[in-house]
Amino acid sequence: MILYDRLDSKYDIQKLYNNLLGTKGHSVNYIDWNVAIEIVEPHVVRIMTPRGSGTGFLVSASADGITCAVATAAHVVADAHYWEQPIRITHQQSGKSVLLRSAERAIILEEANDTAAVIFSKADLPLPAQPLELAPEGKFLKFGNEIGWLGFPAVAPAEMCFFSGRVSAVRKSGREYLVDGVAINGVSGGPAFWNGGANVTLIGVMSAYIANRATGETLPGLTVIQNVDQFHEISKVFKNVDEAKKQETPPEQPPASPTEPST
């Protein structure tokens, strides 16, 4: 069975098989998780603000390769954006970092989906020239599939950690996954990816963890992963930071409190 649903005329089914599933039949070849991690790791960054930290990953680069866009969860950067505070982005693999003040970056928020993009000059960070492939816009991975994600949990903030779980459900018309897996503070904004086919596919952004408190106790719950639809448009709105500033989300009001516990 094809793993992406809601196919329409915009996407050719055979092309999805070939490009995303890596097969012309119904079976799927999977990349070993350790290999998938090696593929994704160069794209991952740690994001630190005066009030907290999270994770991000490369989603776009300008044609000249000078400017890049890093995806994260909106709640990771919304407060720093509103107060025009500095944001430090550290490239995990190289250990190099850059401190971005308000004038040196553009932030495009989609708070309703808890996703954001930070656009800046990547001259000081050895990020890859090209981002990994995003899941097709408006498409989602069916429940039951195993996915992985990377991030910097508060219990070990200097270490990039790997997590995995299975998609339990898709809700809000395909904009959000519920996943049977662990999420910890600091992992917010990290890349969620699928290891099926010829390469890994980025399918979401780590957003929140919903604990089970039905009995009054805090019991294991579900992780919330937002889809990557916002980032299909990011490459179309900037050529450099000044161009991106024209599309920047105005910091007109304090960031809203998350409706569910965030990571």
Image (cartoon, grey):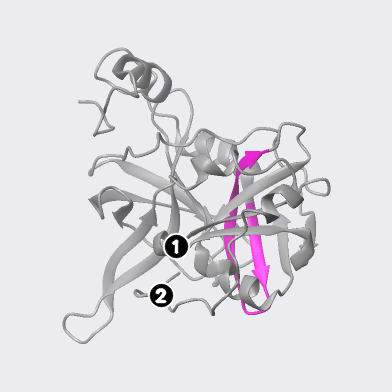
**Residue 46 among magenta residues:** yes
Q: Amino acid at mark 1?
A: Asp
Q: Seen from this angle, which residue lies furthest left?
A: 215
Above or below: residue 23 compared with residue 254: above
Q: Residue at x 34, y 39 (%)?
A: 138
Which corner quadrant of the image does residue 60 belong to? top right
Considering depth in this image, is 251 or 63 the residue closer to the camera?
251
**Dominant secondary structure of the residues highlighted in magenta in the image:** strand
Q: How many marks?
A: 2
Q: Residue at x 76, y 54 (%)?
A: 95
Magenta part of the chain: 45-61
Does the rendering let one see residue 100?
no
Q: Is residue 234 something that shows in the picture?
A: yes
Q: Residue furthest right?
A: 124
Q: Quadrant of residue 113?
A: bottom left
Q: Is residue 60 positioned above or below 105 on the image?
A: above
- Sequence-wise, the earlier of marks 1 and 2 is 1
Q: Residues within 10 Å of mark 2 (few under 14, many from 20)?
A: some
Q: Is residue 22 left or right of residue 153?
A: left
Which element is circle 1 on?
loop
Q: At x 40% / y 25%, what residue is drawn? A: 20
Q: Amino acid at mark 2?
A: Pro
In the rendered structure, does residue 224 fall within the stretch colored magenta? no
In the image, residue 97 lies at what x, y percent?
78, 57
**Cβ–Cβ below 8 Å for labels 1 and 2?**
yes
Name the residue beneath numbered marker 2: 258
- The residue tagged with tag 2: helix, strand or loop? loop
Instruction: Please give the label number shown on residue 39.
Output: none
Toward the front, the furthest residue is 246
Asked whether, in this view, residue 226 is left or right of residue 105, the answer is: left
Residue 114 - label: 1
